Amino acid sequence: MFYIGVLGFVATAIGISIGGLLTMLLRRFQQGIATIYALCTGLILGLVFLEIVPESINLGGWTIFILGIVTGSLIFLLIHQTYNRVTTITHNSSKDLFMHTGCLLALSISIHNFPMGIAFGSSQHTEISDSILQTLILHNIPEGIAMFTPLLLAGLGIYELLLFTCIVSLPVGIGAVLGSIVGMDYPALWAFIISLAVGIMIMVTLKEIFYEALRHSSMVYSLLISGVGALIIGMYLKTI
C-alpha cells in the first residue's frame, strides 16, 4: 500500500525535476522577462484548458466544475490578500514578487496533484496502471517549467528548489495511498478538487504571470508569445 505512494511521489518528482532542468536551459536563451512570462502563460493556460478542464468536466459535470472554479478563485483572492501582508525577506521587491508567484503556483499544482494520486492508487491492479505512471511523469514536466520559472527568477538555490519539488510531489504519494484504499468512488469530490485547482491556476496565471509580461512588453507581443506557448503544450499533449 505504501509502496504505491512512494512510486507516485517519485514519478511526480521526476517530472517536476525535468521541467526544472528545462527551465534552467531555457533561461540561457531567453530574450527578457516578458518572453519568459508570456511563454509560461501560454504553457499553463494550454495545459489547463486542453487537459485539466476536460478531465474535471468528465468526472463531475459543468455544475461542479463551475462551483470549483469560483471556489478556487475566491481562495486565490484570500491567499493573495494574506500573502501581501507577509514580507518575504529577499531584500529585493522583484524577487519577492517572483517568490509570491512561485508559491501560489506550487499550491495550485499540489491541490491538482492530489486527485491524480487517487487515480494512480486506485488503478494499481489494472492494465492502465503503467500508463498512468508514465502520464504522471510527462504531465508534470510543463507544471515543473511553470513553477520553476518564477522560483529561479527569485534566486532560489538547489536545496530550496528540491524542497518545492517534494512539496508538490507529496500530494500524489498521499493520494495514491488513499486511492489504493478507497478507489475512485467519489468522482464528484475529485472533480471539485481539480476544478478548485484550476480556479487558482487561472487566477495566478492571469494576475501574476501574464500581468508581469504586460508590464515589460506590449499586449500584442505578450499574446503572440502566449499563443506560441499554448501551441507548444498542445503539440506536447498529443504525444503523451
Image (cartoon, rainbow, N blue to C red):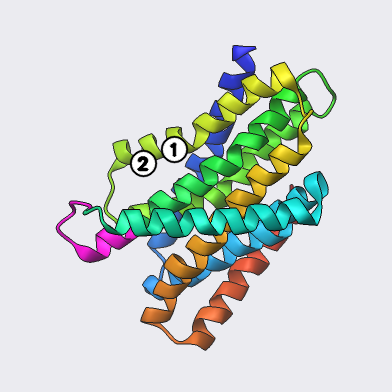
Please state if 10 lies on the left or on the right of 195 as rendered. Answer: left
At horizontal 44% and vertical 35% (from top left) the residue drawn is 167
Q: Start and end of the magenta stretch? A: 88-98
Q: Which residue is mark 1?
A: 165
Q: Secondary structure at mark 1?
A: helix
Q: Which residue is mark 2?
A: 161
| Nearer to us in this view, 224 or 52 | 52
* Image coords of residue 175 (percent x, y): 62, 27
Quarter the N terminus occupies: top right
CA distance for labels 2 and 1: 6 Å
At horizontal 58% and vertical 54% (from top left) the residue drawn is 71
Look at label 2 and name its amino acid.
Leu
Q: Mark 2 near mark 1, Cβ–Cβ under 8 Å?
A: yes
At horizontal 57% and vertical 81% (from top left) the residue drawn is 224
Q: Is residue 62 above or below residue 220?
A: above
Q: Is residue 6 above or below residue 14?
A: above
Given the current orientation, which residue lies at the most extreme left position? 91
Look at label 1 and name its amino acid.
Thr
